[in-house]
Image: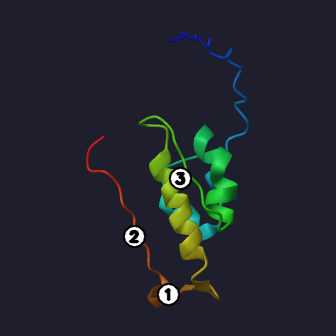
């Protein structure tokens, strides 16, 4: 056999980017983030897809990176689609969230 060594890529400086303030979210979504001033870096990077579109997405990140709140943003996107004239049409909301009990 032939051994091949592939060196790791050089780390690039992370673009911290602007964090999305909770106050910029729709009013109904702000209620889910009580006491939080802004989304973290991961959540800010995906908020357009998670909250403002119906696109599928896959989020892979370490424990504690904020994936649960990304899922919450996606849930809020679905809830927002069930609000008519400022009233939540509860009979239209059907959401299943599956998460591991242990990391």
Marker disc for residue 92 = 1
Compared across the picture, whether 38 is left or right of 24 comes to left
Q: Are marks 2 and 1 in contact (CB under 8 Å)?
A: no
In the picture, which quadrant includes the C terminus? top left
Decide: is 86 above or below 7: below
Secondary structure, mark 1, is helix
Sequence order check: which comes first, mark 3 or mark 2? 3
Asked whether 55 or 9 is in front, the reply is 9
Question: In terms of sequence position, does the residue under pointer 3 or pointer 1 come before the other?
Answer: 3
- Residue farthest left in this picture: 101
Confirm whether residue 85 shows in the render. Answer: yes
Disc 3/disc 1 C-alpha distance (Å): 22 Å
- Quarter of image, res 98: bottom left
Residue name at image x 73 percent, y 39 percent: 18
At a point 69% along the width and 25% down the height, the residue shown is 14
Quadrant hosting residue 97: bottom left
**Regarding mark 3 in the picture, which secondary structure is present there?**
helix
Quickly name the residue at label 3: 70
Q: Nearer the viewer, residue 61 or 15?
A: 61
Residue 41: % across, % down: 62, 38
Q: Which numbered circle lies on residue 96? A: 2
Residue at 59%, 41% (x, y): give it: 42
Q: Position of residue 46 (x, y in %)?
A: 64, 50
């Amino acid at each position: 056999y032939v051994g091949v060594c592939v060196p790791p890529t050089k780390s690039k400086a992370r673009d911290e980017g602007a964090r999305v303030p909770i106050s910029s979210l729709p009013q109904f979504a702000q209620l889910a983030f009580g006491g939080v001033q802004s989304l973290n870096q991961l959540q800010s990077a995906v908020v357009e897809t998670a909250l403002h579109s119906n696109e599928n997405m896959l989020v892979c990140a370490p424990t504690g990176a904020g994936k649960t709140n990304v899922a919450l943003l996606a849930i809020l996107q679905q809830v927002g689609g069930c609000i008519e004239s400022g009233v939540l049409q509860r009979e239209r909301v059907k959401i299943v969230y599956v998460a591991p009990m242990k990391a």
